[in-house]
Image: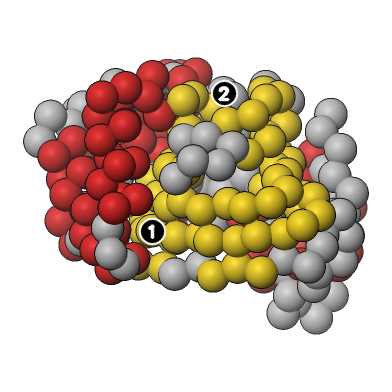
Amino acid sequence: MTGPLHGVYPAGAAHAALAGDVVGYCGYVEHSPVPVRRRELPGPRVPVIISFGDSLSVRSPGLSGELTSFVAGFHDTFAVTEFVGGQCGLQVDLTPLGAHRLLGLAGADLRDGSIRLSDVVGRQAADELVERLVEAPDWATRFTLADVFWSHRSEAARPVDAEVGWAWERLRRSGGRLRIGTLAAEVGWSRRHLASRFREQVGQGPKEAARVLRFARAVRLLDRAPSLSDLAAEAGYADHSHLVREFRALAGCTPSQLAAERTGAQVAAEVP
């Protein structure tokens, strides 16, 4: 359940040179004397959590454990995080292609579970990054240090097929509503070849990625849609029932339950 949580969450934009790879930065300093549980929803990003020391309990279909600094995947289902006491660190949101380019992740590594940051970038690099961030005098300096870290990673970035990059952007801009056959025809590949290359570099196949993009759009529209039927139509679902089924599958709850949670109600999420 949620408790008397106190926190600050400074946000920062990444350097323009990192556009397409780094979505942005969000710092967090929070404290609660009672357990705080959150439902973390799937979306078109790969979160990198850089903890300044405190561990976080993470439960998802592919993982259950206490983590500090880690890379989450481009999931198609939710996770539940929980902590009590203090939390302090920096969250970096990468695009799936950014995680492929900057972290060298591919295929299932982009999708499944959560990977310790030190296992991805090396223990020395991870420890040095955390140390610099902890010693920085303010959040603006931390965001600049993060820019430098990712810029250095980009110098040896893993290549991405131009066709996959183009297809991802087309799918993202459509909110997941573009037909995969149309997408394959536009890049001049067969559906099978597109699915294979896309899955290797994005983590999900184009059909699965479209599902997550469509869901993420529905979540963004949830608070201002006049009704669930209107929300279903605007987000690209067949009908109200289709919308509810997808929310149950990807969020573990109905749209109404999620809306209630977002107003600060109790989170009672169970991972399947």
Q: Is residue 110 left or right of residue 76?
A: left
Q: Is residue 44 left or right of residue 120?
A: right
Please tell me whether mark 1 or mark 2 is closer to you in this view. 1
Q: Quadrant of the C terminus?
A: top right
Q: Name the residue: 50% across, 47% down.
A: 44
Q: Is residue 133 above or below residue 162?
A: below
Compare residues 196 and 124 and report the one nearer the observer.
Answer: 124
Residue under label 1, please give it.
Answer: 25
Secondary structure state at the residue bearing disc 1: strand
Give the number of the disc on residue 127.
Answer: none
Q: Quadrant of the N terminus?
A: bottom right
Q: Name the residue: 34% across, 66% down.
A: 139
- Circle 1 packing at 10 Å, graded few (<14), some (14-19), many (20+), is many
Secondary structure state at the residue bearing disc 2: loop
Q: Is residue 92 left or right of residue 218?
A: left
Q: Total number of numbered labels?
A: 2
Compare residues 232 and 51 and report the one nearer the observer.
Answer: 51
Tell me the amino acid under the disc marked 1: Tyr
Q: Is residue 244 above or below residue 168?
A: below
Residue under label 2, please give it.
Answer: 112
Q: From the top left corner, tell me how far across and down residue 58 is, in percent.
A: 67, 34
Q: Name the residue: 62% across, 53% down.
A: 86
Q: Is residue 7 left or right of residue 245?
A: left
Q: Is residue 139 visible?
A: yes
Q: Earlier in the sequence, mark 1 or mark 2?
A: 1
Tell me the amino acid under the disc marked 2: Asp
Q: Name the residue: 72% across, 79% down.
A: 224
Q: From the top left corner, tell me how far across and down residue 89 is, in percent.
A: 46, 51
